[in-house]
Amino acid sequence: MRASTRSWCLALNTNLPAIEKWRASLSERERARLRDPQSIVKRWQKATAPKAKPDALAKAEAAWKSFIGCMNALPADQAAPLWHAALAELASMAHA
């Protein structure tokens, strides 16, 4: 099995309950057309994707996720001062 096919199968299996619920809403003809894992997962993602967010919000969310990932990778003694700085920045923004 090709690595890409295996990857799509894993994505399908990971999201199986939600995908099954979505597939139940499709017509018999549409279900019959969606046979391979890639087409099923891609169509499900497209059909259930949240509405587009404003660009600034999407960038802010991506930056936040990146920040959290980086902070989790740091030892606690290195992360603590950064958390304090982030909380201080938040406090100053709340009072502005």
Image: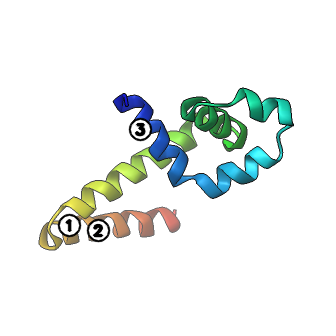
Q: Amino acid at mark 2?
A: Trp
Q: Amino acid at mark 3?
A: Ser
Q: Earlier in the sequence, mark 3 or mark 1?
A: 3
Task: Tell me where residue 24 appears, x and y as whole percent.
Answer: 80, 48
Task: Tell me where residue 43 appears, x and y as whole percent.
Answer: 66, 33
Q: Under tag 2, what secondary structure? A: helix
Q: Give residue 38's quadrant in the image.
A: top right
Q: Nearer the viewer, residue 49 or 14?
A: 14
Q: Could you tell me which residue is drawn at 74 percent across and 47 percent down?
A: 22
Q: Looking at the image, is mark 2 or mark 3 nearer the viewer?
A: 3
Task: Tell me where residue 16 appears, x and y as whole percent.
Answer: 60, 53
* CB atoms of marks 2 and 3 within 8 Å: no
**Numbered tag placed on residue 79 in the rendering:** 1
93 sits to left or right of 55: left
Badge 2 crowding class, 10 Å Cα cut-off, few under 14, some 14 to 19, many 20 or more, is: few
**Numbered tag placed on residue 7 in the rendering:** 3
Badge 3 crowding class, 10 Å Cα cut-off, few under 14, some 14 to 19, many 20 or more, is: few
Q: Give residue 54's quadrant in the image.
A: top right
Q: Is residue 66 above or below residue 31?
A: below
Whether residue 8 is visible here, answered yes or no, is yes
**Which residue sits furthest right?**
27
State the separation of the CA atoms marked 3 and 1.
Answer: 34 Å
Q: Could you tell me which residue is drawn at 34 percent across and 58 percent down?
A: 68
State the separation of the CA atoms marked 1 and 2.
Answer: 6 Å
**Numbered tag placed on residue 83 in the rendering:** 2
* CB atoms of marks 1 and 2 within 8 Å: yes
Whether residue 60 is visible here, answered yes or no, is no
Q: Under tag 1, what secondary structure? A: helix
Q: Looking at the image, is mark 3 or mark 1 nearer the viewer?
A: 3
Q: Nearer the viewer, residue 61 or 15?
A: 15
